[in-house]
Image (cartoon, rainbow, N blue to C red):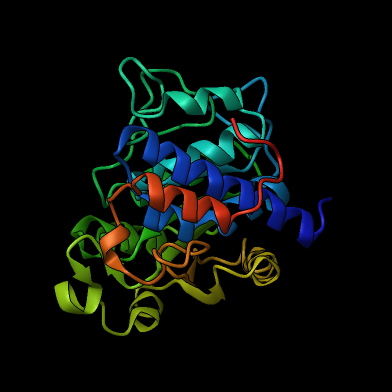
Amino acid sequence: MPSIVELEKVASQVRRDIVRMVHAVNSGHPGGSLGCTDYLVALYFEIMNHQPKPFDMDGKNQDVFFLSNGHISPVFYSVLARSGYFPVAELATFRKLNSRLQGHPTTHEGLEGVRMASGSLGQGLSNAIGAALTKKLNGDKSTVFSLHGDGELQEGQIWEAAMYAAHNKVDNLISCIDYNQQQIDGSTDEVLSLGDLAGKWHAFGWDVLHMNGNNMQNIIETVNKAKTHLGKGKPVMIIMKTEMGNGVDFMMGSHKWHGVAPNDEQLATALGQLEETLGDY
């Protein structure tokens, strides 16, 4: 079981991977990837019961994860590679021709760890619910996790899925919202206010928890608390407060880094703020 310090060191390396990947092809989404790094590291290196090899699309008797906001693929790919799903060296192919590491995760390339294509926002919750119901039908006691952007909640399919999960007592599902309050065109308040987010999920019949998504200790404590809500007739939603661009000072808190790659000078500055702990790819 890794310590908090060890998990934070993994997160530092993942953040290095993120900025290097998007810089190399001058394309990608660093802001949300950096903000969600701690959560995904905690999931894959501490919380989930999962088996990287041999990879099984069905994930039977394993916890499985679905990334709905697929544009933050850099953090997803880095965490999958660093936790053993595919070679870390393959990160160097991100967004390149014929790469398995497309800008948004896809399944037809057969990339280990990816169980759904994502990038068309709003669809991931429906997929996660389907997987959770399948586990219940099969008598599989494992947990399904999913991650969603806050801007993604402006999609109507999310709320159809929310109603469905509560009505059907999908109580083996822990979903999480990256609540950084930023999206590609500005703040969520400016584009389309989300209002009382916790109140909405409560009203839709979910148990709701809150956590600091940039604090490793709080993430682990909160997700472990969420696990105690499972099997009680309700799905669980965690509203995770993060800061876009977390870990790189000039990216933090600005929607402008949603989908912009750093230039050479900015990359050097970012890498100077992030400790190399596991070795760069």
Outermost residue toward the top in this view = 98
Residue 271 location in percent, x, y? Answer: 54, 50
Q: Which quarter of the rendering shows the C terminus?
A: top right
Q: 12 or 38: nearer the eye?
A: 12
Vertically, is 269 above or below 252? above
Q: 219 or 37: nearer the eye?
A: 37
Q: Residue at 69%, 64% (x, y): give it.
A: 220
Q: Residue at 41%, 27% (x, y): give it.
A: 101
As drawn, is 14 to the left or to the right of 101?
right
Residue 255 appears anywhere in the view: yes
Residue 187 location in percent, x, y? Answer: 24, 73
As drawn, is 253 to the left or to the right of 227?
left
Outermost residue toward the front in this view = 265
The number of numbered discs placed on residues in the rendered structure image is 0
Residue 262 location in percent, x, y? Answer: 35, 49
As drawn, is 188 to the left or to the right of 210?
left
Vertically, is 61 above or below 200? above
Vertically, is 81 above or below 110? below
Residue 170 appears anywhere in the view: no
Q: 173 or 185: nearer the eye?
A: 185
Q: Residue at 58%, 46% (x, y): give it.
A: 14
Residue 250 location in percent, x, y? Answer: 40, 66
| Quarter of the view holding residue 222 | bottom right
Vertically, is 150 above or below 67? below
As drawn, is 159 to the left or to the right of 112?
left
Q: 42 or 126: nearer the eye?
A: 42
Q: Residue at 48%, 55% (x, y): give it.
A: 269
| Quarter of the view holding residue 186 | bottom left
